[in-house]
Amino acid sequence: MGALTGVVLAAFAGYGIAWYVGAIDGNFALLLLLAVVVTGAYWVAERWVFLPRRRAAAERAVAEARRRREELARQGITADHGDPEEALRRRFLAQPWWLDWTAGLFPVILAVFLLRSFLFEPFKIPSGSMIPTLRVGDLILVNKYHYGIRLPVVNTKVVDNHSPQRGDVIVFRYPPQPSLDYIKRVVGVPGDEVAYLNKRLFINGQPVPRTAEADFYDAEAMRYRKQFVEEIGGRRVHILLDDERPAFIPAAADFPGREHCRYTVEGVTCRVPEGHYFVMGDNRDNSLDSRYWGFVPERNIVGKAVFVWMNFGDLGRIGAFE
């Protein structure tokens, strides 16, 4: 079993390394599910097969040690250089390394799998598309059950809950490449007409209220950007605009549902289809979002981003956000 377990662990390690170096598109949910199945099988085998065998071997060893001492005592020999019975039992009951790394890890892996699949999942913000709401390096928690409970890996919803609302910050599977997770803000729900014209957001023909704020200093770009506050879905949302970027949308993809959109030199206007959402980054001129690649299908939604639990470069970032 040690050799077989070594091969299994090597396969997991190889998958992780290939994913890390970019040789394959990894799927952490699938990897975690396989780890639960494999370690669970070892845990069951340990409980019902391997541990009973070791217990039986321990009892045989203890009985043999007693028999030997009794035989020595009959011969008048009282010195006994064998292991004490308790030490003998511990030696026989100790798990081999291949069970330590499988059955021993099963409770931890199962807890992580259940927590990540049905309650909360951590994510790291990799880009500046959601500045100033979320910064590069923010570690966030995503509520997995707010929009309903989904089966791991296949992401099929089995229990419904809330629907995404305008203003929600969501994590979703990037439609052109579902192995990637994106984070954006919902600005249009099914049936809405969303227009982004001359860098102003309109929903169902009405301009979204917007007020100017003090300029925001972008530390990465080492420059100030214009900052505004929009009222989206009853939330005050801070957005950034870059006067040097044009209003029109360059190089928009030929995405499913593009027939619902009209592109002009002023920007884009889209009617959001049923079962889909229109999302944008708060850093409006530095965000690859629905303006470029289309709508987010409901089935792609992972959860609602709710909390920054750590930023190692700025502990003041910890807390809830809109």
Image (cartoon, rainbow, N blue to C red):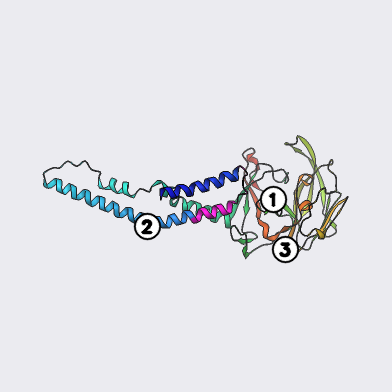
Q: What element carries label 2?
A: helix
Would you say residue 30 sits in the magenta stretch? Answer: yes
Q: What residue type is labelled 1?
A: Ile
Q: In which quarter of the image is residue 53?
A: bottom left
Residue 322 visible within the image: no
Q: Position of residue 129 (x, y in %)?
A: 73, 45
In front of the other: 260 or 223: 260
Q: Where is residue 166 in the image (x, y as percent from the top left)?
A: 74, 57
Dot 2, crowdedness within 10 Å: few (<14), some or many (≥20)?
A: few
Q: Residue 49 carries which label?
A: 2
Pointers 2 and 1 in contact (C-beta within 8 Å): no
In front of the other: 64 or 291: 64
In front of the other: 259 or 301: 259
What is the distance, in whole Å, between disc 2 and disc 1 at their CAs? Answer: 46 Å
Describe residue 77's horizontal placement relative to residue 204 as left or right: left
Label 3 sits on residue: 275
Q: Magenta segment, which residues?
A: 21-37
